[in-house]
Image (cartoon, rainbow, N blue to C red):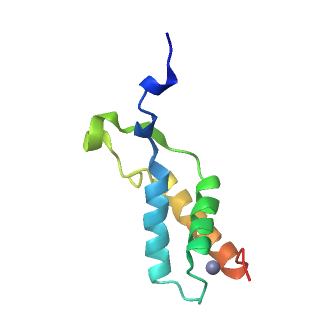
Amino acid sequence: MFDINNYEFENLVDEGRQLVITEIGRQLAAYPKKICLCNDCILDIAAMALNSLQPRYRCSLLGSIYQSDGLSDPEYSASLKHAVKVAIERVGSNPGHD
Ligand SMILES: [Zn+2]
């Protein structure tokens, strides 16, 4: 009988998540404008960037052997950088709080 609790769904990971987080750090380290860096704004930026990207789910069962960094795909890498840039600009100029 199928029991949903028998499966390790925590091994289902979106590779894009970590890549977006890393890219936000990279871009903000050299960001020319002053924007809010509070938890809400940074998480908003991450969510916005991730929602505009193609999901990259994979099963992490095999550990890091088959883990690609995603950036070896030039098309994805370009979309990732663009998505983060746009999200920083949008949230930066219009934070979700006062
Ligand atoms: Zn903020």
- Left or right position of 82 against 16: right
Q: Position of residue 36 (x, y in %)?
A: 60, 83
Q: Residue at x 59, y 52 (%)?
A: 53
Q: Position of residue 90 (x, y in %)?
A: 69, 73
* Residue 60 versus residue 38 in the image, above or below: above
Number of marks in the rendered image: 0
* Residue 95 versus residue 69 in the image, above or below: below
Q: Position of residue 27 (x, y in %)?
A: 49, 76
* Image quarter in which the C terminus is found: bottom right
Q: Nearer the viewer, residue 41 or 48?
A: 41
* Residue 66 versus residue 19 in the image, above or below: above
Residue most extreme to the top? 1
Q: Nearer the viewer, residue 39 or 21?
A: 39
Q: Position of residue 79 (x, y in %)?
A: 56, 58
Q: Residue at x 57, y 79 (%)?
A: 38
Q: Residue at x 55, y 73 (%)?
A: 39
Residue most extreme to the left? 65
Residue 22 occupies quadrant:
bottom left
Residue 89 occupies quadrant:
bottom right
Q: Quadrant of ligand 1?
A: bottom right
- Left or right position of 87 against 58: right
Q: Residue at x 64, y 54 (%)?
A: 51
Q: Nearer the viewer, residue 28 or 79?
A: 28
